[in-house]
Amino acid sequence: MREGVPDVPSTSTLARLGEFVLGAPMATNAPLATGARGQIWGGHHATQGTPVVIKLGTALSAQARAAAALHHVGVVEILDSGNVSLETALATRGALLEGSPYVVMERLSGGSLKDRPPSTFFELRPILKQLLCVLGHVHANGVLHLGLKPGNVLRTLTGLVKLTDFGLESVFWAAEYSAPEQRGAHERDHGPWTDLYALGCLAWTFTCGRPPRGRPPFIPIFEVPVGFEAFLNRLLHDCPGHRFQRAADALAALEILDDLGPRQVSAFGGVEALTSSFEAPVGAENIWAVGPTLSSSFAAVEHRPEYRGEAAVDGFSGLRPADFGRAELEARLRAISPEPFDLESERGLLWEAFSLVIDSGQGSLSLLRGRAGTSGLAAWLGVLAHETGAATVLRVKHEATTGLTEPLASCFRRHLRSDGLDARGTADRLRGSSASSFRDARLDADQLAAFISGDDDEASNDRHRVYADYLRALGVERPVLLILEDVREGDDALVFAASLVELAPPFPIFCLATLRHEGPSPPSVVGQHAPSTSGRSQPKLRDPSGLAT
């Protein structure tokens, strides 16, 4: 037996793993595949007979567990996991070692993209759209895949694709599909953009017949629309900050490719323009830590000589979330959630208030009060705002004993991924930002870093002024959703939030505060504050169960 890899159980013995049995009832008792991490077996539920896949020698990672808990249609369902019991080990005469890990997953019959790659853009485009929707959802819930490759994208018989093996590639990553920040000690720079790089590698491989390692010339083997190369170049940029930052941003860019014109593969593998139209069928805690890519290690990376199409990539510059309004926001919402929520519900009222900030570009403060459900309602908006790419989401867990200063600093450290760094290291991350919002804003990086890292004890007024400048800088790239949890009326958290809304010139920030309340009432929107100079009307805030406004 190789270390960490179980031997094949005897064909005369079906191993029992919890409620599941190793060995498919309708197939020979042999593994489906064997790799460095273990064996993949067929199996079935002991009483229901439902076919499953059982991975032996594979432990369930934290990322996989978190992804499975989302119960998303685009994520392969984890049915069980654990360790081989002594009873099972004895029953298999040691073929399965006691304590060795296993994972039981739903079994799909359509193979993987490695077995059945898309052969036309008509087939590739809906696959990319499905993957972007799935990635957007898991990213919004604080989960990264970090190992996207053709073999980890499974097909169903109905045409859907599902992601599997979340987090496994953090150790066993595939070099051909890994982002630059995965190839060194740059874990602080892992984020949604890391998975989007891998998605770009996938799309390039299917389009050109080989991975983009070394960035070979873009020579598609089937028809693709003009602009697709620029789309891939954006996904595959060496610097994380120059890629699409959210799956929703990439999805919006993919949607407009039909408007950028067509092109066609020639008989000699070249590309020539087409004159006819080309149409393709359309087929929680860590969430708040997903912030900008700020590593100086990558900010200084120059474009490699073979990198082409930067001008074409600029064709997507108009997709900045800071520039779009309600129509674009609703379009993104429909793309990820075809079934709208009740606009008269608490969620609907909250979404309406948030949409006004997106549409107007001005700040607003809303208050939620209720004993149970307020944090969940605020978290729902945070996930949706991140998933649609509509806002940068920050959560501040307020503590009455510490005031607002330390919770804000902790929130910003998570966002900057600077936990454990001193003021100098934090300032380096700020200066290393490739995001235009940080380059163009008049930020005092040293002062901000000192406040965030706790190396400066200046008065709260100075600290809050610098924090406000930082939030304004974030708002250049996309609106900001600042969630203040468990505040009390009169707390300095509310005073600070109200001051953000009143800043001139205004910037798009939606401050959402959950108020502590000991009564039995459900969560409700109890008040809203907008700049007195804005002159815009506010939505009527009411609750079908009788909320106060």
Image (tube, rainbow, N blue to C red):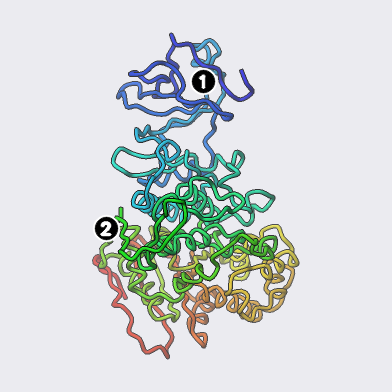
Q: Is residue 149 above or below residue 491?
A: above
User: Where residue 191 appears, x then y in whole percent?
Assistant: 56, 56
Which x, y percent locates residue 429? 68, 65
Could you classify mark 2 by the number of other residues whose Cα lies within 10 Å: few (under 14), some (14-19), or many (20 or more)?
Answer: few
Q: Which quarter of the rendered picture does the C terminus lie within?
A: bottom left
Q: Position of residue 109 (x, y in %)?
A: 34, 32
List the residue tagged with mark 1: 85
Direction from residue 259 to residue 420 in the image, left or right: right
Instruction: Tell me where residue 382 sits by quadrant.
Output: bottom left
Residue at 44 percent of width and 81 percent of height: 362
> Amino acid under label 1?
Ser
Q: Secondary structure at mark 1?
A: loop
Q: Secondary structure at mark 2?
A: loop
The numbered mark, 2 or 1, whose residue comes first in the sequence reads 1
Mark 2 highlights which residue? 339
Q: Can see residue 334?
A: yes
The residue positioned 60% from the left and 66% from the top of the image is: 412
